[in-house]
Amino acid sequence: MPRSNDSARHAGASSAGGPEFDEFYLASRRRLVLEAYALTGDLSAARSAVRDAFVAARHHWRKVGGLTDPEEWVRPRAWALAQRRHVARLWRRDQELSADQKRVLDALHHLPDQQRKVLLLTHLAGMSLEDIGRELGETPARIEQQLTAGTRSLGRETGAPDTGVLAAIESLVPVVEAADLPQALAIHRGGQRRRRLQAVTAVLVLLALTLAGGVFVTGGLQEPAAAGPAAAGRPVTQQMLLSLPQVQALAPRESWTEVGTSDNTSGTGINSICQDTRFADPQGRGTFVRTFVTSGSPRRSYLETVEISRSAAAARAAYTTTRGWFAGCGEARLQLLNTYRLEGLGDEAEMLRLRIPGATSRTYVVGVARTGSLTVSTVLETRGGHPIPVARTLNALTEALRNVCGADPSGACPDVVTAAPVLPPPSGETPGTLAAADLPVVGRIARPWVGTNPVPARSNVAATTCDKTNFLASGAPLAMTRTFLIPQAQLPRRFGITETYGQFVNPNRAAALVRAVIKDMRTCEKRDLGAKVSSEVAQTRGYRGSEFASWRLDSEIDKASTVGFWMGVARVGRYVAQVNFTPTGDNDVDDVTFQALMTRARDRLFELP
């Protein structure tokens, strides 16, 4: 990116005493934002990271300003902050980007982290191989290999020649040029606030040490001890993560290996199935990720993630986000099976069990816990073979919280921990309705279910020819319908799941609708000689007064063809949901599977007030 003319446009933004800093800031800020944007694909993260890196530079300007190239001090800090804050693949949803710009960002993010940095340092920062090697901790020969490989990969995906890498990256310049960046005066003020805060902190630390010393001397009259400084803070460290012996207890007869530990700022940042973004708390203080795997069969992996938030409130949000990744997972064929609430483990904790059936089935046991300002999550994946019992995964999650409970950001250490089955957590989709992770696996279809947004149920498309249920006419002033399809499966248009749900004025009116549906289905064959009703299951006294019923209906269209439906109805209090699944050919389910779907439809109604 060419040197910016910002310094000419914003000369009046300088604050007294810092013209050299102003010139440096205005000349380099957009180039650094471009670098951070190309590195992460997240313009918001790039802007805030560059801003904060410049605030730190202003704070330390006496030292930074004396360097040969102050930009080399700012850049690594800006890059690290941007990678810490960015949301994975955010640019794919950015409607302002052109197809070519999205292609460049995709190509950059398909590169290994080190190759991407080498390309940006070479083409945007104009650094030599030797300087890049010093910054990235690699030999010049290795940097040259990374540059060659990255150039070829980028060219394959964008169609740019080897000499066109800079032009491809600079196609992102208009995005950065249009971004609103803070003026130099704002950076000056930020640096001054930072200096004042540091001074106040130093005074408070000195005061604390003085008070601690006084208390110590007073206490020393009763219990002599060697004088010394007050105890240092107890941050979360890598040594507090799960150890290999602790993970070995998950499957004692299998051979586990610790793969590695990171701060999750490199690569895509997506470490497990269903994870949507690099961090659950993009503004957190830090993250640790540790991975373990087994050899042989079955293949297992165990992932531990610890996110350190700035407050308990931020950690609560991170906990909800992490849990939502799995409760609302849209992965093809994935099903949320069970949820357990964990008592005695941190401030809040849950465990979820999921699976992807197939020739080589995959099962997942996910634990999420919050203690103080920490969010700890674990993901156990098993490919083939028997899954590990939930009790063992609970023990491992408990050990993970015991490891960190001595740190300052943590809450109390675990005591007696118990697990109890509970309703599924919110999916992030429409409250009260089924979600993609609730839906059945159908045939050999390996594509995900997708749900439409709810629309008013002026006509009830979940009804059958037997019941012809009309929610509005039955006394539900508010009734909505949504449909689930598998768009990429190329199935007939009639295939899909439709759910209609309504709120009645009171539970009696809702129960009357359920009774009417049951009566209509039981008498349908007498009224329609072409209809066959089977597989009836009715539970009229369920959990917390709920009820549901389900049927299979096969309707004869003519002597040569029959259309089949699965239909069910569920009620919780004054809410009712009716579900209709229309299969096609071999893409069908059995009665046990549909009953499980209706049970989940009932469970989702408990989300409503």
Image (cartoon, helix red, strand yellow):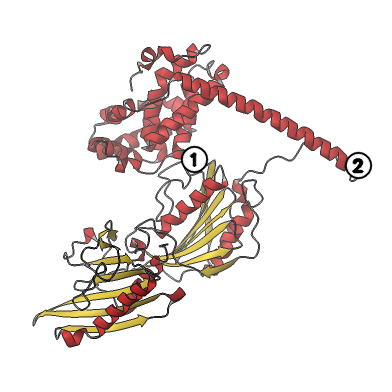
What amino acid type is highlighted by mark number 2? Leu
| Residue 120 visible to an observer of this rendering | yes
Residue receiving disc 1 = 283
Q: Quadrant of the N terminus?
A: top left
Give the residue displayed 56% in from the left and 42% down from the top. 310
Q: Which residue is at 37% across, 17% downward? A: 6
Residue kind at label 1, given as amino acid type: Gln
Picture coordinates of residue 364 (x, y %)?
A: 44, 63
Of the residues under marks 1 and 2, which one precedes in the sequence? Answer: 2
In the rendered structure, find residue 559 and report the number of the disc placed on it. Answer: none
Q: Is residue 355 above or below residue 163?
A: below
Side of 230 relative to 459 (left or right)? right
Mark 2 packing: few (<14 Cα in 10 Å), some, or many (20+)? Answer: few
Q: Residues within 10 Å of mark 1 (few under 14, many from 20)?
A: some
Looking at the picture, does residue 533 appear above or below residue 177? below
Label 1's element?
A: loop
Q: Residue furthest left?
A: 559
Q: Position of residue 531 (x, y in %)?
A: 17, 83
Indicate left or right for 305 with 359 as reference: right
Q: Is residue 76 in view?
A: no
Q: Quadrant of the C terminus?
A: bottom left
Q: Which residue is mark 2?
A: 221
Q: Position of residue 559 (x, y in %)?
A: 8, 83
Mark 1 touches mark 2? (CB < 8 Å): no
Left or right, 527 with respect to 59, comes to: left
Which secondary structure lies at badge 2? loop
- Which quadrant of the figure has residue 469? bottom left
Residue closer to the observer: 482 or 519: 519
Q: Residue at x 46, y 56 (%)?
A: 323
